[in-house]
Amino acid sequence: MPQDMPPSGGYEPVQYRRNLPVRGFRPAYYLLAVGVVCTYGFWRYGQGMRQQNELAREKMWSRIHLIPVLQAEEDRDLVRRALASQAMEKELLGAQTKVYNSDRFVRPTYAVIPTNVTK
């Protein structure tokens, strides 16, 4: 009996790997896309921080420029209260009394007392 020999041209190669189709893009493309998105995000974040810093600077300078106006309003209110207090004192006592032994101006302090406090 003749021995079996391989066919002419040889056997077909044995398939030992899975033949799965490649899905999606190459990993380098994903890495490039993530880099582009992160770069854009950091750029926008930097723009936002610049804008926030500019708004904070503008707010600070507006408050600095408002200080004299607010101080003038407080001084006017203080003078109005002092004159009203002197008028009330003169009306009640008939004369104006000196509280301090000095002519130096002492800034009065006022305490705001809530009206709904129970005693």
Image (cartoon, rainbow, N blue to C red):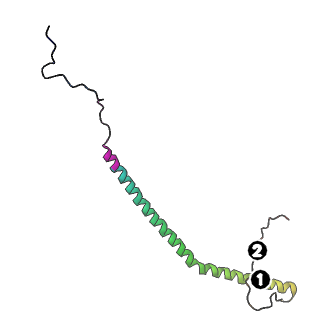
Q: What stretch is highlighted in magenta?
A: 17-31
> Which residue appears at 49% of the width and 65% of the height?
52
**Extreme residue toward the top, this view:** 1
117 relative to 111, above or below: above
Magenta run includes residue 72: no
Left or right position of 24 against 96: left
Label 2 element class: loop
> Which residue appears at 67% of the width and 79% of the height?
74
32 relative to 77, above or below: above
Residue 117 location, x and y as percent? 81, 65
Q: Which amino acid does label 2 sit on?
A: Ala
Q: Nearer the viewer, mark 1 or mark 2?
A: 2
C-alpha span from label 1 to label 2: 16 Å
Looking at marks 1 and 2 on the same chain, the residue that comes earlier in the sequence is marked by 1
Left or right position of 88 against 40: right
- Which mark, residue 111? 2
**Extreme residue toward the left, this view:** 8
Label 1 element class: helix
Quarter that holds the C terminus: bottom right
Q: Residues within 10 Å of mark 1 (few under 14, many from 20)?
A: few
The quarter holding residue 8 reads top left
Q: Which amino acid does label 1 sit on?
A: Ala
Magenta run includes residue 26: yes
Q: Name the residue under label 1.
A: 84
The quarter holding residue 1 reads top left
Residue 95 location, x and y as percent? 85, 89
Could you tell me if the residues under marks 1 and 2 are in contact, i.e. CB atoms within 8 Å?
A: no
> Which residue appears at 55% of the width and 78% of the height?
65
Towards the viewer: 80 or 44: 44
